[in-house]
Amino acid sequence: MSVSSIKDLYVHQLIEMYNAETQILAALPKMVKLAPTTVLQQAFDHHYNQTVTHINRLEQILKAYNVQERPGENKALFAIVEQGQHLTTLIDTWLTLELALIAATQHVEHYEIAAYGTLHMLAVQLGDEFAAGLLELTLNEEQETDLLLSQLAMQDLQTQPELVSHTSEEYIRPL
């Protein structure tokens, strides 16, 4: 696809985010299984459902621009997910695993927040009020997810302060 106008850039980035969201959708069930606490599992389940909605919104917008084909992989998101997956293989305590999963997910969320912020701005500039509204909803949901993850991490650290400074085997969670 040639990118020679703002509209072309917008459509290209919509396709990139569609691919990113489908990759996230594939990764979330694995994260649910890795999550050491029910609270984090539920947060990931909730975000899975949100991601389905995000994909549906992107499909609506892409359909309005007559974009049928959405091939490819979002390379930036792939790298972020790979880095997070690698980090989880190095961890042997449940608290550290929980915090690493939250951190990895927040890396993804921050990527999405930046992308949806840009997409929203481009939709506004192009006068596409319908898409701008959908993209703003998604942007707000991504920001809420990021805030929730920060709160979960802080709760973990506040309720388990003795685990933060200890590495004793009594705190190791079998993986």
Image (cartoon, helix red, strand yellow):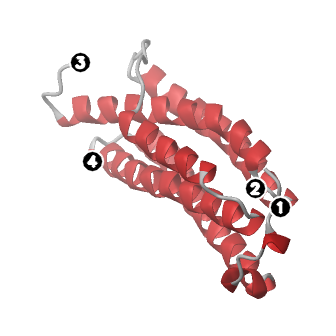
* Crowd tier of the residue under label 3, counting other residues whose Cα lies within 10 Å: few below 14, some 14–19, many 20 or above: few
Residue 158 found in image quarter: bottom right
Q: Earlier in the sequence, mark 4 or mark 3?
A: 3
Q: Which residue is mark 3?
A: 1
Question: Residue type at mark 1?
Answer: Val
Say above or below: 82 vs 156.
Answer: above
Is 124 on the left or on the right of 142, as rendered? left
Q: Residue at x 28, y 41 (%)?
A: 126
Labels in figure, total: 4
Foreground residue among 167 and 15: 167
Residue 146 percent location from the top left of the image:
58, 63
Nearer the observer, disc 4 or disc 3? 3
Calculate the distance from the C-alpha at mark 2 to the C-alpha at mark 4: 34 Å
> Which callout, 4 or 1, points to the residue nearer the camera?
1
Q: What residue is at 82 percent from the left and 61 percent from the top?
A: 173
Position of residue 83 measured from the top left corner of the image (x, y, whole percent): 47, 47
Q: Is residue 90 above or below residue 156?
A: above
Question: Residue 43 bears which disc, if any?
Answer: 2
Q: CA distance from mark 2 to mark 1?
A: 6 Å
Judged by depth in the image, the label closer to the viewer, 3 or 1, is 1
Label 2 with label 4: CB-CB less than 8 Å: no
Near mark 1 (Cα within 10 A), the count class, few <14, some 14-19 or many ≥20, is few
Disc 3 or 1, which lies upstream in sequence? Answer: 3
Q: CA distance from mark 4 to mark 1?
A: 40 Å
Q: Residues within 10 Å of mark 4 (few under 14, many from 20)?
A: few
Residue matched to label 1: 39
Residue in view at x 32 percent, y 29 percent: 11
CA neighbours of label 2 inside 10 A, class few (<14), some (14 to 19), many (20+): some
